[in-house]
Image (tube, helix red, strand yellow):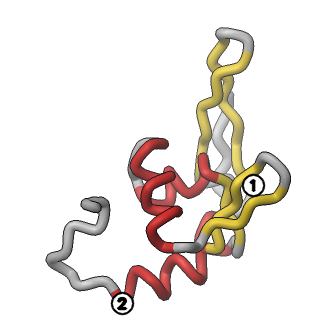
Amino acid sequence: MKREENQLYIIQEKRNNKKEEKLLPVRLDEKRCLTVEEFQIYCSMGRNNALKLIKKSNAGIRVGRKILVDRVAFDKWLDTVESDADILKD
């Protein structure tokens, strides 16, 4: 899959036991609500830790079965966390 300059991010998905790559047309720092997969890229972490962080920050929004993350609320929460704190620790 060819990558264009204005499309900065690639998401790899598994569907029907096949890996597919999907280009994101919008930069993640320009979006207000992120999917869990986009949030994983935004925070550079795996799915389990991303879900823990979403729950801990209270930035998650459920829309049916889909979870969206309010990026602005997450960033504000992250600014309030102490820099040496282990935020994923319970």
Secondary element type, mark 1: loop
- Farthest-out residue, top: 17
Q: Residues within 10 Å of mark 2 (few under 14, many from 20)?
A: few
- x and y percentages locating residue 36 in the rendered image: 61, 51
Residue at the extreme right of the image, as rendered: 64
Judging by the rendered image, the residue that carries numbered circle 1 is 25
**Kind of residue at disc 1:** Pro
Observer-nearest of 43 and 82: 82
* Amino acid carrying mark 2 in the image: Thr
Q: Secondary structure at mark 2?
A: helix
Instruction: Name the front one of labels 2 and 1.
Output: 2
Task: Decide if residue 7 is on the left or right side of residue 56.
Answer: right
Picture quadrant of residue 31: bottom right
At 70% from the left and 55% from the top, the residue drawn is 67
- In percent of width and height, residue 52 lies at 44, 55
Q: Is residue 24 above or below residue 76?
A: above
| 82 vs 7, nearest the viewer | 82
Q: Position of residue 79 (x, y in %)?
A: 38, 87
The residue to which callout 2 is attached is 80
Label 1 environment density (alpha carbons within 10 Å; few <14, some 14–19, many ≥20): few
User: In the figure, 25 relative to 82: above or below?
Assistant: above
